[in-house]
Image (spheres, rainbow, N blue to C red):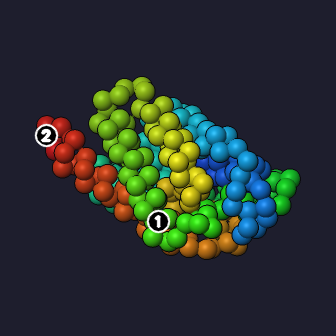
């Protein structure tokens, strides 16, 4: 297994949590499990999206810059990567997410929940899981039809980062728009808050598989199949 690919996935996921969750943590209002709200949604959305853009161009030629176990699952289902590669990516993605959150905890100058992904008070579990499914579908759909298909050339990273940004702008006030099990698990472990954590694994997984099925069944060029 290529060490450079694993290093790229680890560093990219670490950065996504350290910067993305960090932006949420330092702009949030309230403390602990009551700290749902945040003062600047656009800042949080751009922090996540711009990390994706930056690392797509920095490491995309090595690992493809998944930095998200749900994305890796989608590519595995679509047979774009091998199972051994997916397992290696999952290990380093979760490790990067956990260590990124622990590093954030060590440097954060304010008390808070480290950007843990939890449902807003007025959002129930069914609503929350559908938000995660739909928004992850949009994200992975963009990945397939830009980076994987090769149709967008050098603009793929920008398209993917912008998709994550707009997904957070919509879903942030509802579920904090994880769309990424590693983005959820790291802050959950570092903060000790595991409320409804399962839906942040199930929702992104379902959304990613749906996007993979659509790409293979409809959008993938026949000559690529």
Alpha carbon separation for disc pair 2 and 1: 36 Å
Query: Residue 46 in the image: x percent, y percent?
Result: 61, 38
- Seen from the viewer's position, the closer of residues 23 and 2 is 23
Mark 2 burial class by Cα count in 10 Å: few <14, some 14-19, many 20+: few
- SS assignment at label 1: helix
Query: Label 2: which residue?
Result: 222
On the picture, is 194 further left or further right than 212?
right
- Spot the residue most to the right: 109
On the picture, is 22 further left or further right than 194?
right
Residue 27 seen anywhere in this rendered image of the structure: yes
Quadrant of the image for the C terminus?
A: top left
Tag of residue 127: 1
Numbered disc in front, either 2 or 1: 1
Q: Earlier in the sequence, mark 2 or mark 1?
A: 1
- SS assignment at label 2: helix
Q: Which residue is at a point 59% across and 36% down the rendered structure image?
A: 50
Query: Residue 28 in the image: x percent, y percent?
Result: 74, 54
Tag of residue 146: none
- Seen from the viewer's position, the closer of residues 24 and 84 is 24
Residue 186 occupies quadrant: bottom right
Residue 61 occupies quadrant: top left
Query: Residue 173 in the image: x percent, y percent?
Result: 60, 54
Query: Residue 98 in the image: x percent, y percent?
Result: 64, 62
């Amino acid at each position: 297994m290529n060490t450079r690919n694993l290093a790229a996935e680890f560093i990219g996921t670490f950065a996504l949590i350290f910067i993305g969750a960090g932006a949420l943590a330092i702009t949030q209002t309230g403390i602990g499990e009551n700290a749902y709200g945040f003062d600047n949604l656009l800042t949080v959305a751009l922090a996540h999206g711009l990390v994706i853009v930056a690392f797509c161009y920095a490491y995309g030629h090595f690992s493809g810059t998944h930095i998200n176990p749900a994305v890796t699952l989608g590519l595995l289902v679509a047979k774009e990567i091998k199972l051994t590669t997916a397992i290696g990516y999952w290990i380093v993605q979760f490790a990067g997410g956990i260590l990124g959150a622990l590093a954030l905890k060590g440097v954060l100058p304010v008390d808070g929940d480290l950007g843990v992904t939890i449902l807003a008070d007025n959002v129930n579990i069914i609503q929350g899981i559908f938000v995660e499914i739909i928004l992850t579908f949009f994200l992975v759909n963009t990945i397939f039809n830009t980076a994987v298909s090769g149709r967008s050339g050098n603009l793929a990273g920008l398209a993917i980062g912008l998709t994550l940004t707009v997904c957070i702008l919509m879903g942030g006030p509802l579920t904090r728009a994880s769309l990424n099990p590693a983005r959820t698990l790291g802050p959950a472990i570092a903060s000790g808050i595991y409320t409804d954590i399962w839906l942040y694994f199930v929702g992104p997984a379902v959304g990613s598989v749906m996007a993979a099925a659509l790409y293979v069944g409809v959008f993938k060029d026949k000559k690529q199949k």
